Image (tube, rainbow, N blue to C red):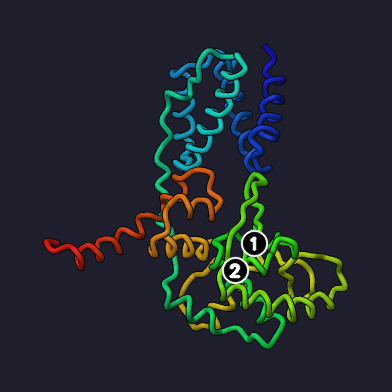
Amino acid sequence: MDVQQDRIAFLEYLQIEKNASPFTIECYVKDLAEFLAFLEKEKLYSPYDVDYSVIRIFLTELYEKQLSRRTVSRKLSSLRTFYRFLEREGKVDSNPFMQVSLPNSNKPIPKFLYSEELEKLFHVNDLSTPLGARNQALLELLYATGMRVSECVNLHMKDIDLSLGTVLVKGKGRKERYIPFGRFAQIALEEYLENGRVTLLMKSNLETDRIFLNAKGTPLTDRGVRIILNKIVQKAALTIDLHPHKLRHTFATHMLNEGADLRSVQELLGHEHLSSTQIYTHVTKDRLRTIYNKSHPRA
C-alpha cells in the first residue's frame, strides 16, 4: 500500500469533504508527518500495522517532550481522524486511536466583562469624528453578535442588512451564518456607514467594500482592532485587559445568563460542537444558585 497516496487522499478529504480551514489542515498534515516519522524511527514502516501498544510508545515520547495536554490532545485528534479515514477507505480494519482517550485540556474559565464595565466603554468614543464613530460601531457590533475578530474585519458592505438588523458572517471552514443585532448596534453602524466610513475611504481612494477601515482608509486588521479596544479601555480609565475574544465571551455569558438556550448560543457563535459552547455554562451556575436561594422556600 502506498502511504504517500493515502496522505494525498487524506488531504483532499480534509479540503473537500470536511471543508477544513487552512490552519486546521496545516496542523493535521504536520501531526501526521510527525507520527509517520516516529513509525519509521521505531522500524514500523507501515501505518497500517499500528496498534494500541505502538500508540502508547508514541504518547510517552510526546509527554517526554513536555508538551501541553492541549497539544497532545490535538495531535491525537488529528491521528484519530486520519485512521477514521483509512478505516472508511478499507485500508485498516479498525481505528487504533479510538482506544485512546483524549487528555483533559483543562480549558481555562473564559473571562468576561460585567455590564457596568461595558457601559463605561460605550460612553468614551467621540461620535462626531470618523474614527470615534467607527470605534463605537466596532465595539457595539462585536458585543451584539459575539463574532470572532477575524470574522468582523472581513465583513463587506453586502453582508450587513440594516433593514432586517442582521449580518452574514463567514466563519471557520468557510461556514456561513446569519446573526441578528440590536438597536444600539444598528444606530452605531448607521452613523458610521453614513458619515465616518465615507470620510475614511476618501483618504485612500481605495475601491473596497470592507466595512471597517483604519485611519488611512484601508481595511482594518485583527491587530488594529486590538489596538482600538486598548485605547477605548484607557479612555474609560478601566484597569481591565480587553481583547476581542473577551467581548465574544461576554456575549455568550450574558446571553446564557438572560435565559438563552445553549443550542441557540452555539449557532450564534458558530461552534461546530456543543461542547465548545458548554464552557460558558459554569458562569451561569453562580447566578442559578443566587436565584435558587432567593426563590426556593427551603433553600
In the rendered image, which quarter is residue 45 located in? top right
Measuring 56% from the left and 32% from the top, which residue is drawn there? 78
* Quadrant for the C terminus in the image: bottom left
Give the vertical position of 194 relative to 35 (above or below): below
In the rendered image, which quarter is residue 211 located in? bottom right
Q: Nearer the viewer, residue 164 or 227?
A: 164
Neighbor class of circle 2 (other Cα within 10 Å; few <14, some 14-19, many 20+) is many
C-alpha distance separating marks 2 and 1? 10 Å
Give the vertical position of 105 relative to 265 (above or below): above
Q: Farthest left residue?
A: 298
> Please, what is the three-letter code of the amino acid marked with disc 2?
Leu
Q: Farthest front residue?
A: 163
Measuring 61% from the left and 24% from the top, which residue is drawn there? 37
**Label 2's element?**
helix
Q: Which mark is residue 167?
A: 1
Comes first in the chain, label 2 or label 1: 2
Q: Which mark is residue 262?
A: none
Percent coordinates x, y for residue 47 in the rendering: 58, 17
* Residue matched to label 2: 141
* Dot 2 and dot 1 residues touching (CB under 8 Å): yes
Would you say 257 lies left or right of 223 here? left
Give the vertical position of 34 relative to 115 (above or below): above
Q: Nearer the viewer, residue 44 or 239?
A: 239
In the rendered image, which quarter is residue 53 located in? top left
> Please, what is the three-letter code of the amino acid marked with disc 1?
Val
Measuring 49% from the left and 81% from the top, which residue is drawn there? 120
In the image, which is nearer the foreground, mark 2 or mark 1?
1
Measuring 57% from the left and 20% from the top, which residue is drawn there? 39
Percent coordinates x, y for residue 252 in the rendering: 46, 60
